[in-house]
Image (cartoon, rainbow, N blue to C red):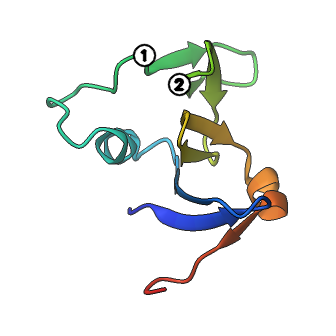
Amino acid sequence: MTAERFVNTVGDTVEAMRWTGDNTRDVALWAEPTLAPYALPEGWWLRQHIAPTGNYFTLVLPCRGSEQDARVGDWIVKQASGFLPVAPYVVRQLYTKIPEGV
């Protein structure tokens, strides 16, 4: 899976990659191409949630002095200030995909 390019509502071009839960290594290498095997970028980690409806993981990213959880299906957006998990409905509302080759 490769990153895609988008334009946000203020005209900034950003890269984003959708986290499927199965592509954690791909997302990590996109964020930091020189990672060691089985490593995540500094400050990133997987959080396990145990719930009556079933267990699941979120990908935790450092964002603006705190931590944000990316759920399966969220987009990880690379901005000048770092990485931000963004829900799919927010991407549909605030970002326009740039076609490949443009």
Answer above or below: position of 62 versus 81. above
Answer above or below: position of 31 versus 90. above
Instruction: Judge by depth and name the residue closer to the eye, 22 or 12.
Output: 12
Residue 50 picture location, percent across and down: 64, 13
Assess disc 2: are there few (<14), some (14-19) or many (≥20) residues with their C-alpha within 10 Å of its C-alpha: many
Residue 55: image quadrant is top right
Circle 2: element type: strand
94 on left or right of 35: right
On-image quarter of the N terminus: bottom left
Looking at the picture, which amino acid does disc 2 mark? Leu
Residue wearing tag 2 = 61
Residue 10: image quadrant is bottom right
In the rendered picture of this protein, how many numbered marks are placed on residues? 2
Assess disc 1: are there few (<14), some (14-19) or many (≥20) residues with their C-alpha within 10 Å of its C-alpha: few
Circle 1: element type: loop
Q: Which mark is residue 98?
A: none
Q: Are marks 1 and 2 in contact (CB under 8 Å)?
A: yes
Residue 46 picture location, percent across and down: 47, 21
Residue 54: image quadrant is top right
The residue positioned 63% from the left and 21% from the top of the image is: 64
29 on left or right of 66: left
CA gap, disc 1 and disc 2: 6 Å
The residue positioned 66% from the left and 66% from the top of the image is: 7
Residue wearing tag 1 = 43
Looking at the picture, which amino acid does disc 1 mark? Gly
41 on left or right of 63: left
Residue 49 picture location, percent across and down: 62, 15
Answer above or below: position of 14 versus 60. below
Answer above or below: position of 11 versus 31. below
15 on left or right of 51: left
The residue positioned 71% from the left and 64% from the top of the image is: 11
Instruction: Judge by depth and name the residue closer to the eye, 50 or 23.
Output: 23
